[in-house]
Structure formats: C-alpha cells, structure tokens
Amino acid sequence: MKLRIPFFSSTKKQEADMKSFLIVGLGNIGVDYKGTRHNIGFDVVDALAKEKETSFETLRYGDVAKITNKGKNAYLLKPNTFMNRSGKAVRYWMQQKKIPKENLLIITDDINLDFGFLRMRKKGSDGGHNGLKDICAQLNSSGYTRLRFGIGADFNKGRQVDFVLQPWNTDEVKTLPFAIEKATQAIWCFMAEDAVAAMNKFNGNTLEL
C-alpha cells in the first residue's frame, strides 16, 4: 500500500500567497514624529496589530507584522524609509510576498479632509502627498487603493509642514481613538469584501458613521 503524500506545487503556493494583503501605514520613524498628524498611518496599523494581539518585527525597509482576519492574511508595514521614500518599501514587500496591486492598501494623512473624515479610493492622484507620490513612481501606477485620514488644515499660509508634524490638539485627542477605530473597521471591510463596499460604508465623517 502506497502512502499518499499531499502535493503542494509552487504554483499553488503562489496562488495562496496572492490571497494575502499588504496594509501600509505611512509615517516617519523616530520619537520626534511619534503621535504627530503626519504619522496617522502608523497609528492605524498599530491599532490593527493591537486588536490582533501581535507585534511588529524590524525587517528590511520597515517594521512588519502578520495578522489574520476571517481567514485572510495581511502583512502590516510601517516603512522606515521616511515618508518621501515610502515607495521603496512598498515595492519590496509587494514583491517579497507576491501581493497583487488590488490587495494593496495605503493609509495616509490628508489635509484636504476635515479632521476625522475618511475617504477610501481605488485609485487617484497623489494629491500633493510626497509619500503617495513616491509610491506611484516606484509602482509606475496610481491604481492602488488608499485610505485617506483627514487631519484638517488649521494652519496659516506657508505653515503646512509645521502643522502636519505637530501633535494632535486637545480636542482632537478626545475623538482620535474613535476615528482610528472606524479606520480599522474600514480596513477589515476592505479585506473581507472589497474597496467599493468599504467606500460605501465608511467614507465620510467618523463621528457620524
């Protein structure tokens, strides 16, 4: 009697990998940037990891954690290449984990949205955001899903850089956890269903969703 050995070809392995997601939070590394508006992407993926009770490991081009939600795997990435070179880390980990472009999600701050507003889009311009601009250049495409987290634009002309690199104000701190929770729910929906479903359910003011 022959023993039947399970066979898992390299093709099947690639197909399995293609079902995984890459969830990237944009930000800058270092204590000087922790808790600032520009680092909301880091804060959101930190919340995802905390919910799944996992931790990040410092690997090439960033801190990485693997999570599972409703049978689907996701790699969480916080690039350590600094905001303006985020694309290098995104491209590397997409290649390493064989992530298809439709399973990539970038989380970033947006001064064009009021504080706490979410806007997910399947594609679009970089909107002047240097992190998204570099990702578009490295991937040679703007056709990837991004979740923009509104941080408002309460700054005087020429003070944009100072504003985004400042910590949240007192009023924002009170509602920030709720806004982050809504962002994580939008990401779970993106993984479980698709970007369109997440857009329909979560685009808008997190205080009213």
Image: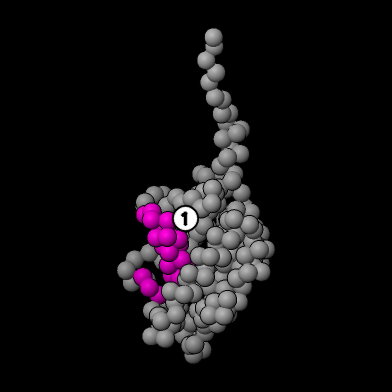
Which residue lies under the disc numbered 1?
A: 76
Q: Secondary structure at mark 1?
A: strand
Q: Residue at x 45, y 60 (%)?
A: 48
Q: Give coordinates of residue 152: x percent, y percent.
A: 52, 82
Q: Residues within 10 Å of mark 1 (few under 14, many from 20)?
A: many
Q: Which of 208 and 9 lies nearest the eye of the viewer?
A: 208
Q: Name which quarter of the figure residue 6 lies in.
A: top right
Magenta span of residues: 34-56
Q: Residue at x 63, y 69 (%)?
A: 201
Is residue 144 in view? Answer: no
Q: Name which quarter of the figure residue 147 lies in.
A: bottom right
Look at the magenta stretch and give its main secondary structure.
helix
Is residue 101 in view? Answer: yes
Q: Give coordinates of residue 4: x percent, y percent.
A: 55, 18
Q: Check the image and name the residue furthest to the bottom.
A: 156
Task: Reply above or below: 102 against 167.
Answer: above
Q: Check the image and name the residue furthest to the left.
A: 31
Instruction: Based on the picture, tell me whether residue 178 belongs to the magenta stretch.
Output: no
From the viewer's perspective, tell me whether residue 153 is left or right of residue 170: right
Q: Quadrant of the N terminus?
A: top right
Q: Name which quarter of the figure residue 113 lies in.
A: bottom right
Q: Give coordinates of residue 53: x percent, y percent.
A: 38, 56
Q: Residue at x 53, y 73 (%)?
A: 149
Q: Give coordinates of residue 185: x percent, y percent.
A: 53, 65
Q: How many marks?
A: 1
Q: Residue at x 61, y 39 (%)?
A: 15
Task: Reply above or below: 111 against 139.
Answer: below
Q: Which of 176 and 110 lies nearest the eye of the viewer?
A: 176
Task: Reply above or below: 205 against 123.
Answer: below
